Image (cartoon, rainbow, N blue to C red):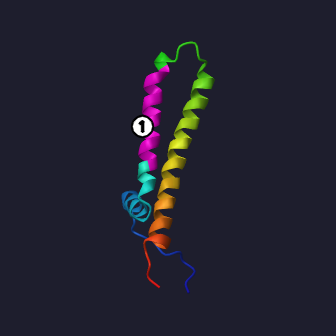
Amino acid sequence: MSGKMPTYDETHSDKLARKARESPFMPIGIAGLVAVCGIGAYKYKHRGAMSTSVFLMQLRVAAQGTVVAALSIGLGYTMANEYIFNKKE
C-alpha cells in the first residue's frame, strides 16, 4: 500500500449521468426546482403589495416542496420495485 489516493477519470457530466441512472427522480427534482425558480422570477414583477421577503420565503417553500415530492415519489417507486414487484425468493 503506497498510501496514495486512487485517481478516477470521471468528469462532472459522467458523474451526473451515473447518478441519474442510479436515481432517476433526482434530475426530475432538479428540473422542478429550476421550473419553480423560473416561474418565481417571472412572477416577481407581478407580486403586487407583497414584500420581497415574504415572496422569497413562499418561493423557497414551493421549490423545496417540489424537490421533496419528486424524491419521495422516487423512493416509493424504488421500494415498490424492490419489495412488491420483484418476487424473487
When the figure is inspected, residue 30 is found, relative to residue 2, above or below; the finding is: above
- The mark total stands at 1
| Residue 17, x across and y down, in percent | 37, 60
The residue located at (41%, 44%) in the rendering is 31
Q: Is residue 67 left or right of residue 57?
A: left
- The quarter in which the N terminus is drawn is bottom right
Q: Main secondary structure of the magenta part?
A: helix
Identify which residue, 83 or 31, lies in the foreground: 83
| Residue 77, x across and y down, in percent | 46, 61
The residue located at (47%, 34%) in the rendering is 37
When the figure is inspected, residue 78 is found, relative to residue 66, above or below; the finding is: below
As drawn, the residue found furthest toward the top would be 49
- Quarter of the image holding residue 3? bottom right
- Quarter of the image holding residue 12? bottom left
- Name the secondary structure under disc 1: helix
Bounds of the magenta segment? 29-44
The residue located at (47%, 57%) in the rendering is 74
Q: Is residue 48 magenta?
A: no
Q: Is residue 37 left or right of residue 65?
A: left
Q: Is residue 36 magenta?
A: yes
Identify which residue, 2 or 20, lies in the foreground: 20
- Quarter of the image holding residue 39? top left
Identify which residue, 25 or 4, lies in the foreground: 25
| Residue 87, x across and y down, in percent | 44, 78
Three-letter amino acid code of the residue under disc 1: Ala
When the figure is inspected, residue 10 is found, relative to residue 3, above or below; the finding is: above
The residue located at (50%, 43%) in the rendering is 66
| Residue 86, x across and y down, in percent | 43, 75
- Residue wearing tag 1: 35
